Image (spheres, grey):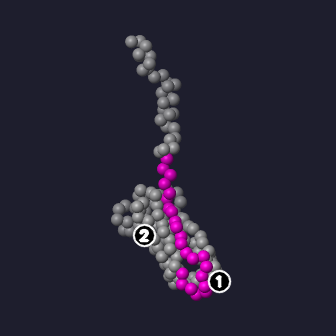
Amino acid sequence: MHLLQLLFRAGPGVLLMVLCLQLGTNKAQEDNRTVITMNLQMPQTAEENEEVTLKLTVGTELRECMVIKTSLRGSHTMDGPFNYIYTACLCEDYPRTFYWDFEVNRTMAIAAMVHIIEKEGICPNKAVVPNGQKYFYTIRGIQVV
């Protein structure tokens, strides 16, 4: 009986070791979900004054919904639909696709930008603003031939 009591009696060293094992990092518990994924599709070349379509698909791997604002910026000033800003609710299983139709008159770089914002009334459920980066962008070029 005395032997069993020794086996079940945990000394301070054993308790410390068990605590360290419990608090240790476990790779299976890390959350490596991507906050924003962006897929930008547009032609690489166009003729002068040709209307082109830019398609941006935005997704997330987060379980919660968030409010995003998407827009374009160019290396040269543009007028019209190029300057449209879209605000939408983005959820895990529902990627959003945005379109811009505009005329190009010279070679330029175009940045598609996504900004996670805090705004009520856009998402049907409560929207979150994740910790960390709030601005995301991707840049492509279009050459006028």
Q: Which of the two discs, 1 and 2, sits closer to the camera? A: 1
Confirm or deny contact between disc 1 and disc 2 (CB under 8 A).
Answer: no
Horizontal and vertical percent for residue 45?
61, 79
Outermost residue, bottom side: 49
Task: Say what secondary structure mark 1 lies in.
Answer: loop
Task: Say what secondary structure mark 2 lies in.
Answer: strand
* Crowd class of label 2 (few under 14; some 14 to 19; many from 20; radius 10 Å): some
Horizontal and vertical percent for residue 5?
41, 16
Horizontal and vertical percent for residue 69?
47, 70
Residue sitting at 50 percent across and 74 percent down?
55
Residue 23's place in the image compared with 2, above or below, is below
Q: Mark 2 or mark 1, which is nearer the start of the sequence? A: 2
Task: Say which quadrant the N terminus sits in.
Answer: top left
- 39 inside magenta stretch: yes
Outermost residue, left side: 124
Q: Residue 118 lies in what quarter of the image? A: bottom left
Horizontal and vertical percent for residue 43?
57, 77
> Tag on residue 88?
2
Number of numbered callouts drawn: 2
Q: Tell me if residue 120 can be seen.
A: no
Q: Residue 95 lies in what quarter of the image? A: bottom left
Name the residue carrying label 1.
145
> Tag on residue 32?
none
Determine the CA span between mark 1 and mark 2.
35 Å
Residue 33's place in the image compared with 142, above or below, is above
Residue sitting at 59 percent across and 74 percent down?
110
Residue type at mark 2: give it.
Ala
Give left or right: position of 144 versus 59. right
Q: Which residues fall within the magenta stretch?
A: 30-52
Residue 103's place in the image compared with 141, above or below, is below
